[in-house]
Amino acid sequence: MKNIMKMFHTGTIKKTITIKAPKEKVWVKLSNIVGLPSWASDVKKTTYLSKKRRGIGTIRSITFEGGNIVEEHVIGWKNGEYFTYIATEGLPLRAYVATISIKSKNKKSSHITWQSYLNSNKMSTKQFRGVLSDMGLFYQTSLKNLKKNLER
């Protein structure tokens, strides 16, 4: 059996979508950071771990269908434009920071970008490519769900 070298890996993910809904309507949905089960793929439940409900310092726990639980802390917030969060537990990563941002395309349409930086625990290159692929698919599927949800 071949000895597979395990090391730390760094990567980025960026997915975008245009939604036929005004920016304000989309922001209401996105900024409810415990509302993920209504649009994020495979999310069973999301709860607050902080007294704070919006803005920097808000903490949430996300339980996925497979049982994995991820803790995230909001570290950046500009009302109506973006929020940035870090995962502190539950991922096979040493670092994960993501931003979801929104821009008006016109009065009836919004452009959403979900992008992240991640640095893995020690793993093979193949394992890391799998993590990147899975997260990219999660972002893409979730954004499509958000679009479907808001364009009703």
Image: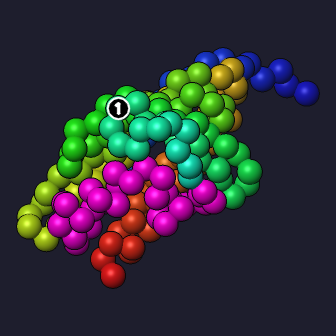
Image position of 43 with respect to 76: above or below: below
The magenta segment: 17-45
Residue 117 placed where, x, y %? 43, 30
- Which residue is at 49% across, 57% downward? 36
Q: Please, which residue is most extreme toward the bottom here?
A: 152
Front in this rendered view, residue 141 or 97: 97
Image position of 149 with respect to 59: above or below: below
Q: Tag 1: residue type? A: Ile
Classify mark 1: helix, strand or loop: loop
Whether residue 103 sits left or right of residue 44 in the image: it is left
Quadrant (top left/top right/bottom left/bottom right) for the C terminus: bottom left
Asked whether 20 falls inside the magenta stretch, the response is: yes
Identify the residue under disc 1.
56
Asked whether 115 falls inside the magenta stretch, the response is: no
Can residue 145 be seen here? yes
Quadrant (top left/top right/bottom left/bottom right) for the N terminus: top right
Quarter-of-image position of residue 83: top left
